[in-house]
């Protein structure tokens, strides 16, 4: 059997930071009304090893190579909060701040209950939240 799921593509190492690391807030320039199960896809683009910020983020994932072109995990999108002054002043976790772009006018997508897939699923990514048919064995 197969099921259609909602997926969000992110570049590496951000996708792996959600799947295997400390990232529980995805920062976006756009709001979503969607709430519920969301699968995280690592886009096919390879991260630049020469970028100091990418290197710093990769240090949060010791021994893990970028997982490009794969759906890595399932999580729950529980909220989408506008980044106003009150929200930004409450964001004191330095690791979470390192993992996102926190600025007025952006949105914080709150993620919980992250579950890594037993086998990553190859997929071609898309912009926005997209649908994918996933084997029930991976749900």
Image (cartoon, helix red, strand yellow):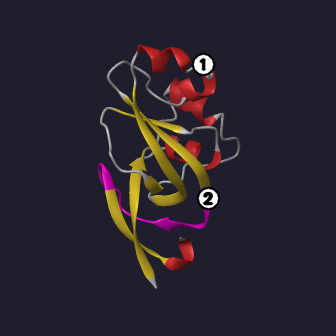
- List the residue tagged with mark 2: 116
Instruction: Tell me the crowding category of disc 2: few under 14, some 14 to 19, or many 20 or more residues within 10 angstroms, Cα based.
Output: some
Q: Position of residue 131 (x, y in %)?
A: 33, 63
In the rendered image, the vertical position of residue 74 relative to residue 85, given as above or below: below
The residue lying at 40 percent from left, 57 percent from top is 7
Q: Position of residue 51 (x, y in %)?
A: 48, 28
Q: Nearer the viewer, residue 12 or 24?
A: 24
The residue lying at 32 percent from left, 43 percent from top is 32
Do the residues bearing badges 1 and 2 touch, measured as CB atoms within 8 Å? no
Q: Earlier in the sequence, mark 1 or mark 2?
A: 1
Q: What element does badge 2 sit on?
A: strand
Q: What element does badge 1 sit on?
A: loop
Q: Nearer the viewer, residue 35 or 40?
A: 35
* Magenta-drawn stretch contains 118: yes
| Apparent side of residue 64 relative to residue 91 in the rendered image (left or right) | right
The furthest residue to the bottom: 1
The stretch of residues the image draws in magenta is 115-129
Marks 1 and 2: which is nearer the front? 1
The residue lying at 46 percent from left, 66 percent from top is 122
- Does the rendering let one see residue 19? yes
The overriding secondary structure of the stretch rendered in magenta is strand
Q: Position of residue 38 (x, y in %)?
A: 45, 56
In the rendered image, the vertical position of residue 86 relative to residue 131, given as above or below: above
Res. 92 mark? 1
Q: CA distance from mark 1 to mark 2?
A: 26 Å
Q: Position of residue 34 (x, y in %)?
A: 36, 50
């Amino acid at each position: 059997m197969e099921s259609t799921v909602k997926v969000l593509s992110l570049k590496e190492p951000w996708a792996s930071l959600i799947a295997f690391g400390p990232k529980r807030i995805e920062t976006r320039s756009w709001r979503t009304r969607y709430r519920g199960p969301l699968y995280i896809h690592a886009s096919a683009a390879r991260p630049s090893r020469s970028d100091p910020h990418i290197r710093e983020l990769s240090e949060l994932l010791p021994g893990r190579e970028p997982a490009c072109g794969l759906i890595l995990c399932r999580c729950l999108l529980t909220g989408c909060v506008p980044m106003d002054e009150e929200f930004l002043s409450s964001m004191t976790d330095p690791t979470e701040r390192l993992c996102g772009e926190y600025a007025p006018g952006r949105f914080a997508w709150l993620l919980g209950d992250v579950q890594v897939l037993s086998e990553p699923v190859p997929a071609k990514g898309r912009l926005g939240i997209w649908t994918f048919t996933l084997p029930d064995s991976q749900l």
